[in-house]
Amino acid sequence: MTNLDPRSLIAMAGFMSAVMAVVLLFMRRHYPPWIHGVGAWAAAPVLWLVSTVLFGTRGFVPDWLSLILANQLLVLGTVVYYMGTRRFMGQPTPWRLWNAVMVATTVVFTLLTYWLPHYALRVGFFTLVMGAIYGAQLRFMLRHGGNGFPVRMVEVVLVLHMGVLAMRLASILSGHAGEHLMEPSLFQTLYIGAYVLTVLMLSIGAVLMATDRLRTELEHLATHDSLTQTLNRRALLEHCEDELERARRHGNGPSIMMVDLDNFKAVNDHGGHQHGDAVLAHFAERTRQALRRGDRLGRYGGEEFLVLLPSADVEAAMVVAQRIHATLAAGHPLDCEVSIGLTSWTGRHETLDSMLSRADAALYRAKDQGRNRTCVA
């Protein structure tokens, strides 16, 4: 392993960066614009690629290219990757702070290249800077990243490479920094090899995080109404069937409420369809606040909604219905009145069609009795 040429490892890192840059740029072009951060993730391996090319020309081009600019591009690529992660997770990108860091590191690298040329100091400083960036990203992801596999994988990669950087710093402090970057020693092979793997795994982690986000969003779109963000009819009826199946095995079945916005045609006619959409979205938001944990709200069609109340008898369901009436009468400009038809599970012979039929009949009775009320069937 000690016979591996550092230039070959650096070239391998450049190749990995080029491949992953192409993959991420392709994703950036074809993924939905609401998945943020992919552009920054694509830019990071491009910067790493240029950096590795400059490192590989060490001894053939001026030091300001192969040392100062190469190190700065490597640092900048890591910062850009971190900013991409922040954008992806919907957090602000503090570029002013990191621009100041880039200026300060440029000054230090210049001093350690021309005015105080010292390989060990330069490598030690670079190691501290990279460790600080990795630490900032790891802390951010632990706080905002969630528990998904792609996020955890990136966190593990960061921890492992921070461990490698700590070993490198320890070797520098113990006087084993080496003489130059291209020295074919065991330490150099390990450090550069770890960098190659880190570039690859961070890029793969970005691909996996973006793909997982796309899958999650598509699943959400497939099961939710785009206007009200409630369950769509198909998804809600599947929840109802599952709840009835559970009730047949264990008893204690659900109640169902059919909810219809009163005089909604007049709302559309007088305020326009955009106002009508705003009323529907407001109704859904306020109704969700009135429901219990575990209740399901879905758009059944038009201005008609269906509420599934697991393990709720008539009395418990009536309490929820009264909360819905009350929360929609709080005085908000978009508040509306609703009629509700309510029915409850009657036993193991019960079917979803029969419950929906009874709830629909109760809803029409509420309309006939003057609207803005709940009737039970």
Image (cartoon, grey):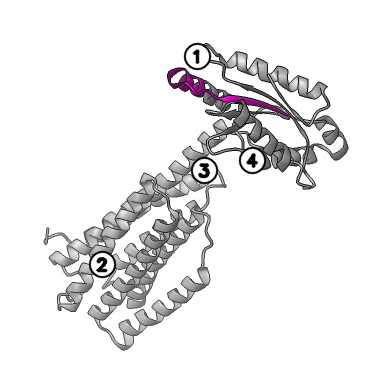
The C terminus is located in which quarter? top right
Residue beneath label 4, please? 290
The amino acid type, in three-letter code, at marker 3 is Tyr
Magenta span contains residue 248:
yes
Of mark 3 and mark 2, the one earlier in the sequence is 3
Does the image show residue 181?
no
Q: Look at the image and give the residue range highlighted in magenta.
A: 242-260
C-alpha span from label 4 to label 3: 36 Å
The amino acid type, in three-letter code, at marker 1 is Arg
**With 177 as the anchor, is 140 left or right in this view?**
right
Residue beneath label 3, please? 31
Image mark for residue 348:
1
Residue beneath label 2, please? 165
Of mark 2 and mark 4, the one earlier in the sequence is 2
Residue at (63% x, 36% y) in the render: 226
Of mark 2 and mark 1, the one earlier in the sequence is 2
